[in-house]
Amino acid sequence: MKSHCTEPLNILIVEDSQTNNKQLHQMLPKLSGYSPTIKSVNSLNAAFKLLGKDNFNVVLLNLDLPDSSGLDTITSVRRNCPEVAIIVVIDESDEDIGAKIFAKGAQEFILKENYNLQTLNKTLHYAIERKRTQEVLDRKQRHLEAVFDAAPVGMMLVAENMIVKRVNNTIRQMTHKKFSKIIDRSIGSALGCINHTNDPNGCGNSSACQECAITEGVKAVLDSQQSVHEIEIHFTLKIGDSIITPWLSVSAEPVMIDGSKHAVVAVDDITDRKKAEEKLKETMEIKAQFIATVSHELRTPLAAMKEGIAIVLDEITGKLNEKQQKFLDIAKRNADRLGFLIDDVLDFQKFDEGKMQLVLQTNNVKEVVLEAYEIMSLAAKKKGIDLLLEFTDELPEVKFDRGKIIQAVTNLINNAIKFTPQEGQISLKVMHQAEELVISVSDTGLGIPKDQIPKIFERFYRVSHPGKEVKGTGLGLAIVKKIVMLHGGRIEVESEVGRGTTFTVFLPLFAKEVKTFLTKQDDEILENMLANN
Amino acid sequence: MLGLFKSKKKTDRARILVVDDEPDLVSTIQCRLEWCKCEVITAANGREGLDKAAQEKPDLILLDTNMPVMNGHEMLDCLRKHPDLKNIPVIMCTALCEATDIATASSYGVADYITKPLDVTQLMGKITAILENKNFD
């Protein structure tokens, strides 16, 4: 009785002996687990015709056929039909018949004298299973090879003796070489390094080879079994007669294969990226140079202007009447304003370049904040704004850059004055909580619309209030933020349109700034420079 | 006795040579220095500066670095080599970015530095300090 879950099976018998054929035709329909469809041919050519037309799962193949004999019969069938399971039917067994037929691509063999249902069953099952497993493995192998080959970075497998065992297509393309000129060579030779030699013991002999980062890196990986990542090298390759100099990024991982240490090396061509980096660096330098030049050019006439005005205001050239005093004051104020604007731009460039460095000292917080307050109190008074100062009683001594913090606080107050109408109020509060010094500047001014709040610290960003143009470069807050961040602190803002804004600066009591600079005892000349800028 | 109370400022009638290629700036410096009763001679470049220094033998030289024809560093070199001029104290005017170069290159023969833009009060302080020192030698 046949079980209801049987697999259909297409069997092709290639056998020129009538007797054998008959035997098989009798037994095969009784296979368990399969519902077979059986076809027979008595020559290899006939077999090929059928194999081409129908899909057979199994071929029962006699090696002695009128048009083919011996193990090569298997080869022929295999070549003709890669997917079919082959069971070889043989008269006599010899010791390594199994190995021989497997080598040729067959899955199983059966002795004629063993034609019985049990053996047939077993053999068929084994043959089909084996073929399936082989298919899966082959497919996996093909996939892996495809992945390895097609990997967008160059990949090399290097053995413990620093010889390249295997590379992918990308390496071949990079080096413009055939695989035969890449495999079983030293790394330098494989890649086409201009320094390589064909010396079987070495990679290259030039002095550059002593410091070759690739060789060092791969050797380190093989020895220590630790990976290396993204070693960047400016390589020189010789391709035919031409020399190219790509930038390469090399990473390597250790791997054990068959009990031996190997390294898998990824080689990525980063020439484009490097070129872009160079370009960017150049652009930044040009920008810095430009800003420095322009600022200097602007400051020079400004200096003469300010001095000219100061000389007259100091009444060196004679006594002034009220009107003369008034308009010269206007000239002075605006010359000063121009000076601050230029300072802001230059400061900002320094911050941007990372050249701004803090002079950290321990400070009496009250004194410092008082100084900022006094600098700004006149400006506030002139606009009719109340500038209030509030300290909590106990303020610890805090380490920070005095000049920069004064600059930050005056910037915040300056902003508050700009955006607060007459009769308004600005409160400067200082307190400390936990490990932080907290300085806040609150105003009763225009407030910042919610959608603009995230942008206010961006350089050149100016909050737009329709109908109320407020002047400035838009750098003030950006500078404040940079100063605060350099100290390892943070800044927060709360605001409501029509009610006012509060900026809160949090500074760590123990500033842990990354770049520290001179201390008081150091070079006075250079300190003066910093102080004046 | 009375003489002790009549302190004569060391800058009175000090002869100062100002070497700078910005005429407007020179005007303002000159005005300030003359207000402090100094005698002021001016030169617009290093070449002119050397000539005037040899001619007028100033008590102090205020020297800008960036000038055409001959710049401040070059003039300083020449001053050092001149037997009559090498002992005249020099204050060099520098732009901030030049500071480190100057500190290393021209340290000999320079009595002090001042950055541009000039702070006149600071300048007067330095001049006074140098002239006082000089009179002790």
Image: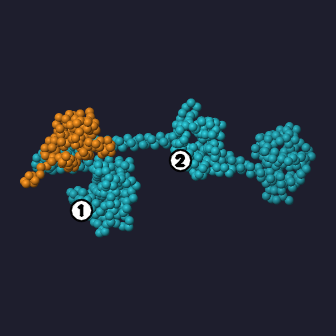
Chain colours: A cyan, B orange
Please say if A434 is above or below B81. below
Question: Which element is circle 2 on?
Answer: strand
Residue B10 visible to an observer of this rendering: yes
Give the Cα distance between marks 2 and 1: 59 Å
Residue A239 placement (x, y as % from top left) = 57, 33
Pick out the residue farthest to the top.
A241
Residue drawn 80% across and 51% down? A127
- Nearer the camera: disc 2 or disc 1: 2
- Quarter holding the N terminus of chain A? bottom right
Report the chain holding disc 1.
A
User: Mark 1: few, some, or many residues within 10 Å (few <14, many ≥20)?
Assistant: some
Report the chain holding disc 2.
A
Residue drawn 60% across and 41% down? A187
Q: Which residue is mark 1?
A: A386
Circle 2/circle 1 CB separation < 8 Å: no
Residue drawn 46% across and 41% down? A276
Q: Which residue is mark 2?
A: A230
Question: Which element is circle 1 on?
Answer: strand
Pick out the residue farthest to the right.
A19
Q: As shown in the figure, which amino acid type bears the numbered disc 1? A: Asp
Pick out the residue farthest to the front.
B137
- Which disc number belongs to residue B61? none
User: Mark 2: few, some, or many residues within 10 Å (few <14, many ≥20)?
Assistant: few
Residue A271 placement (x, y as % from top left) = 51, 40
**The quarter of the displayed image where residue A451 is located:** bottom left
Q: Point out the tag, 2 or 1, that comes first from the N-terminus.
A: 2
* Residue nearest the viewer, comparing A69 with A518: A518
